[in-house]
Image (tube, grey):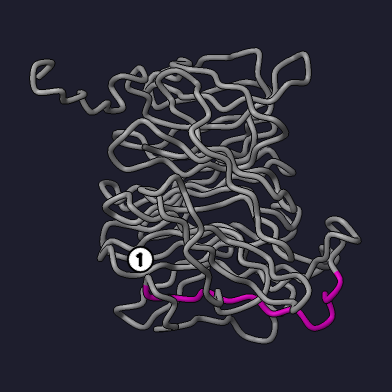
Amino acid sequence: MLASGLTPIRTWADAGSPAYLSAGMKPDGSYVLCGLTGDGEISFELPLPARGHAAAAHPTIPRAVAFARSPGTYAVVLDCTNGQEKARLDAPAGRHFYGHGTCSADGNLLFTTENDFENAQGVVGVWDVRESYQRLGEFWSGGIGPHDIKLMPDGKTLVVANGGIETHPDTGRTKVNLPTMRSNLSYLSLVGVLEDQLALGPEHQRNSIRHLAVSDDGDVAFAMQWQSDLTADLPLLGVHRREAGKTELFEEASVRKMQGYLGSLAFNSDTNQIATTSPRSSVLQIFGSLGQVSETALADVCGVSVAPGGFVVTTGTGLVRTEDNETTHRMAWDNHLIDI
């Protein structure tokens, strides 16, 4: 190999074989992106310039794109084997990131959710991973306030959670259109063709679809955040089964019980279960095909991802809880736990 001048291609094993990625804050107030093993141990810890939100892991090479919390304008591409910054994504003029992104199946493209704030519409940015993450262009997200984005199992379709909330950097995180907001799920081709869309009934007008989890069969679970007082008792969790043309809502994850807020969710296709978290209520819920399976009180729980036979969760108190183990780190884990 040396004689031929070839360089070995690094894999995630060269970064300590992490199973998950999570942003966090250390006791000194500094921000980091960490790799976590399946047992909840930290396999690497890399500095971030500001508070992170979620990350997008490359499907094959040990590289992660860490996104700033909305309305951030940066994303950092990190080599997870040595902490080297490979590239930095700066949102174009008139745009800011929403904290989420996803790669194409071959890892050649990165898709990012963004706000075109002068025109009050959402866009999906397209970046060329092979060319040092040069921006190729953008297309309409199908709504306002796109937050989470996932690649569907067919490898040809993106699903976007358009939260429906209009913001502008001049007013920070202030929500300026609550009386008229409407969220939706939009299914888009990789070149931006709107293929399908789901919007809930008028009683859900203040329910903002924020986060997504996709099963191996293409069912899309979505977590919502209520944008009004807590007197309504509507579900905050749903599943859209696009192929069957059905949408199921889970009343146990309600506005009142969850204080209007679901933080993250995960879909375990092997067990056909969905886990949701609410840091405001400090509640972890698990649902199966027949409804709620369990409910656990867990202080400041938010990050959740799939583990063998179940789920792994993280909390703002530093806990990493797997199916078989609990580990506490001197770290305030941020909202999301991304599986690799």
Asked which quadrant contains residue 227, the reply is bottom right
Dot 1, how many residues are within 10 Å of its Cα: few (below 14), some (14-19), or many (20+)?
many
* Closest to the observer, 126 or 301: 126
Amino acid type at image mark 1: Asp
* Closest to the observer, 274 or 315: 315
* Closest to the observer, 53 or 92: 92
Residue 94 relative to residue 102: left or right: right
Query: Which residue shows up at 56% across the image and 30% down it?
Result: 314
Residue 221 point in image, percent of width and height:
46, 61
Query: Which residue shows up at 46% across the image and 24% down it?
Result: 35
Query: Which residue shows up at 54% across the image and 67% down it?
Result: 124
Residue 285 point in image, percent of width and height:
53, 46
Q: Is residue 200 above or below residue 24?
A: below
SS at badge 1: loop
Residue 47 point in image, percent of width and height:
62, 22
Is 254 magenta? The answer is no
Residue 271 relative to residue 209: left or right: left
Is 186 magenta? The answer is yes
Instruction: Report the span colored magenta.
Output: 176-189
Query: Which residue shows up at 70% across the image and 54% down it?
Result: 261
Q: Is residue 15 above or below residue 213?
A: above
Residue 254 relative to residue 181: left or right: left
Question: Circle 1 sits on which residue?
Answer: 219
Instruction: Identify the residue at the far right of this view.
Output: 171
